[in-house]
Image (tube, rainbow, N blue to C red):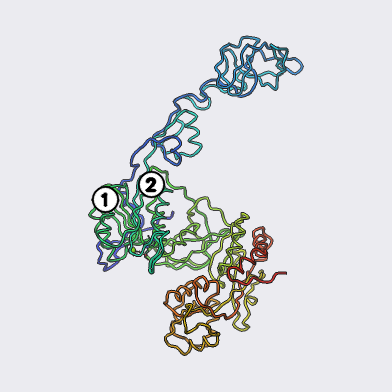
Amino acid sequence: MKPPQGAHSASGGAEQSQFLTVLSRDEALRRWTAALAPKPIGRETVSLDASLGRVLAVSVAAPIDVPPFDRSQMDGYAARSADLAGAAEDAPVRLTLNAETVACGVAPRLPVGPGTATPIATGGPLPRGADAVIMVEHTDPDGPGGILARRPVPPGGNLAYAGSDLARGEVVLRAGTLIGAREIGLLAACGVAQAEVWRRPRVAVLSTGDELAQPGEPLRPAQIYDSNGPIVAAALTENGCDPVRFGAIPDDAAALEAALREAHATCDAVILSGGTSKGAGDLTYRLIDRLGAPGIVAHGVALKPGKPLCLAVCDGKAVVVLPGFPTSAMFTFHDMVAPVLRRLAGQPPRAEASLEARVPVRVPSDLGRTEFVMASLARTDEGYVAFPLGKGSGSVSSFSQADGFFTIDALHDGLDAGALAPVTLLDPGLRPPDLVIVGSHCVGLEPVLDQLAAEGVSARSIAVGSMAGVAALRRGECDIAPIHLMDPATGQYNKSYVPDGAELVKGWGRLQGLAFRAGDRRFESFTLEQALKRVAGDPDLLMVNRNPGSGTRILTDKLLAGRKPEGYWNQPRSHNAVAAAIAQGRADWGVTIRPVADAYGLGFIPILDEQYDFLVARARRDSPAVQAFLLALARPETADALLQRGFTPAERG
Ligand code: AMP
Ligand code: MG
């Protein structure tokens, strides 16, 4: 990971004392590790079966030789190599058989004298006197008591000597080794039944906020689900720690203090999230400083996402407050907290990989803060392209769906379109998708993508809107660009937007209409003309619009014919946001597509069928992934699934 440079200070005029100094990432980490001196927190002995994924605390030496005795590697006869020296197909040597057979697990009783041999199984211990094994395939029976050997065998032939695999006293696994299936096999072969491993640190996970509900609970108005708690817990497990869940604590001093004290007393480290805003924040920080010395060592880090990160050490235990915003929380955990916790867990540093990718669009960034930009990767003929996932730090999906991130350092105000950036991979085993779809996303795509997934074709759909999809296709960054663009001159969809080197494949129709709360008398059972008249004449009606440049906005503006009713400037970026605003009473009407209006239980007055089609790059048309996509699109099951979701599948010949 690229370290940001330089310290930055003075967030200027902040009342919170801890915010007085905003530190660089490196300085914050330096102070925190200096105060914590992270090292493994203790050892424990676990059974071999339970040792998977653990880290050895001490080196293990083989207590025995492996194999423990000289052992045959073949089914055949234990013999003396000197007897076999002259044996050949046309000059076989006769050996007299000794009166025992050495099976696996049977200790031989009789020595092998000159001119004799003892039948022996693979894995059988070599009798005294023998120094080689002749394979049964190279012998013939010669009466009841003898064999004819037809090949010579050198001394040591077809046998393994005691300790040749592992010698007694030899270190077979070193301290610090992460135990996997192969390591368990090695320990078992030496007869080791238990392993001394580093104890997994117990780490308390606390979410804070009055607005948080736990997954599985119903969501009350103004609530959101606690995603940080489960994410942090899972990330702790991935990094060799045992999470101890404390759930979501309300923004209440007594409740938070009680939970924090219990967490600090019973766990090896404490991770909170949220409560970094003013007011509630002051409370958290005062409490942490009371838990033990030295308390907070860094609060405010000059990076984005993640500025409000707070790092503390209380009585030798790490205490961290992650920012509440999920992407900030996950990023700072991954970048700054996990490496330190891994040291407490005795885990080796995380494997990291990076690759160079072209960033196709300009990415603005604040001066004075190192910015980490989550990105989705696609492979093109000219190498990798990194699309910034621009949903911001309040998003859960930015971090979860990113392949990696690139850095814009504090001294730059952005990255130019087309710049090359080293991308740090979040999962070093990245497998680039077989099919890259960039443009407008539609839930109608899901049944098609499901079919591809079932066929083992990995597809990545990057939602950037129709126009940006056309641009990405032009630059060769994707295989397919889904679009729904009305030509305002002709009222026709998509045809006039096909660039050179691409062709248009029919997708489906999405019925656009005017949505309102079901039962709203001001719209119920109206025609479109009546509804538009009502909208024009009723100042109490509040609309929700769409963002400029979207197909729906073009349509809405056409309908409104220059009027700008109340609510016109409320312009979210998605069909769902329009429906949610109406359903929750933040607005009374807006234009959205039928499947979305249905999903929110809204009333709906149809306007027209908007065409959602696919631009396909001609150069990629014959690739197996694009072929699989086109086949899936044309299947009758797809048409059924589209109908079921409220779309109108295109006629296909
Ligand atoms: P806070 O720092 O508590 O003001 O939180 C900042 C933002 O992150 C708010 O929008 C919170 O609702 C959100 N947030 C805080 N904690 C969580 C959490 N555990 N899961 C999801 N979002 C959260
Ligand atoms: Mg909060």
Residue 370 shows up from this direction: no
Residue toward you, 606 or 329: 606
Q: Provide residue 626's location: percent of width, then percent of height.
A: 65, 61
Q: Which mark is residue 314?
A: 1
Q: Residue at x 70, y 69 (%)?
A: 652
Quarter placement of the N terminus: bottom left
Judged from the image, the quadrant occupied by ligand 2 is bottom left
SS label for mark 1: strand
Whether pointer 2 and pointer 1 mark residues with C-beta atoms closer than 8 Å, the reply is no
Whether residue 179 sits left or right of residue 650 in the image: it is: left
Q: Which mark is residue 200?
A: none
Q: Total marks drawn?
A: 2
Quadrant of res 384: bottom right
| Disc 2 to disc 1, C-alpha distance | 20 Å
Give the residue displayed 40% in from the left and 36% down from the top: 46
* Amino acid type indicated by mark 1: Cys
Q: Name the side, left or right, on which 194 lies relative to 377.
A: left
Q: Is residue 152 left or right of residue 347?
A: right
Query: Of callouts 2 and 1, which one flags the residue occurring earlier in the amino acid sequence?
Result: 2
Q: Residue at x 37, y 45 (%)?
A: 343
Q: Measuring from the top left, give residue 102's x and y in whole percent.
A: 59, 18
Q: Which residue is mark 2?
A: 242
